[in-house]
Image (spheres, rainbow, N blue to C red):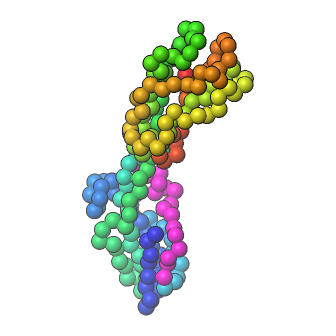
Amino acid sequence: NVVFEDLLSELTYFQAMVYSGPGKTGIVLDDWRVTAGSVTSRYDTPWQLKQQTWNNMLEGFNYVQASAYDTAVNSTTLSGDAFYVKKDTTPPVIDDNESGGYDVWLNADKPGGWNVHYHDYTSLLSYVQYKVNSSAGGLGNTLIDWTNIDSGINAQDHTANWSIQFSSLTAGYNYVSVLAADIAGNTSTWLDA
């Protein structure tokens, strides 16, 4: 939370500006934009950046400058970054190396595990899961609901092969779907991987 204060002539508004690099380096992503305004001696209410400012930010780190104006038209700009915003709106990538299915009859889990990899290069992976249904497209009976393959990953890649709970499958075809979530909360799902 950034607090603004002017005990003499009172504040009228404050604004933010965003750079791609720290300490006013890189390019200006969003020029000075009024963020909030009201005549008061102290503004300590949590505030958020405008939607257009968010839209102008890049994936990764964005560095925010802040300035405040009072009723006498005096202004103060912080000498350094007020804070930074880590932006990630891109969902994780799923590499299905089992694409086309594994059309081999099994009486136990696949030797060597299932070869589906996950990647997220911005906020990093949080968890990966699988689910098994009796029909294609996530339809039919849910044989195994979303189950963690791994959680608390905090890495760009999850490439280890993994196993399923084979005893919960039914005779015949079983349809495995996978999901990846990153730390920012973006998700990707691949039905019938």
Please tell me how many numbered marks the rendered image carries.
0
In front here: 96 or 163? 163
Single out the residue that lies furthest toward the top.
104
Judge whether 124 appears above or below 118 on screen.
below
In front here: 118 or 107? 107
Q: Position of residue 12 (x, y in %)?
A: 48, 79
Is residue 124 at all visible to an observer of this figure? no
Location of the C terminus by quadrant is top right
Q: Which residue is found at the position 72% from the left and 23% from the top?
A: 140
In front here: 151 or 36? 151
Q: Which residue is found at the position 47% from the left and 16% from the top?
A: 111
Q: Position of residue 22 (x, y in %)?
A: 29, 59
Q: Position of residue 104 (x, y in %)?
A: 55, 8
Q: Which residue is found at the position 39% from the left and 69% from the top?
A: 66
Magenta segment includes 159: no
Single out the residue that lies furthest toward the right.
140
Judge whether 111 appears above or below 42 on screen.
above
Q: Is residue 31 left or right of residue 152?
A: left
- The stretch in magenta equals 42-58
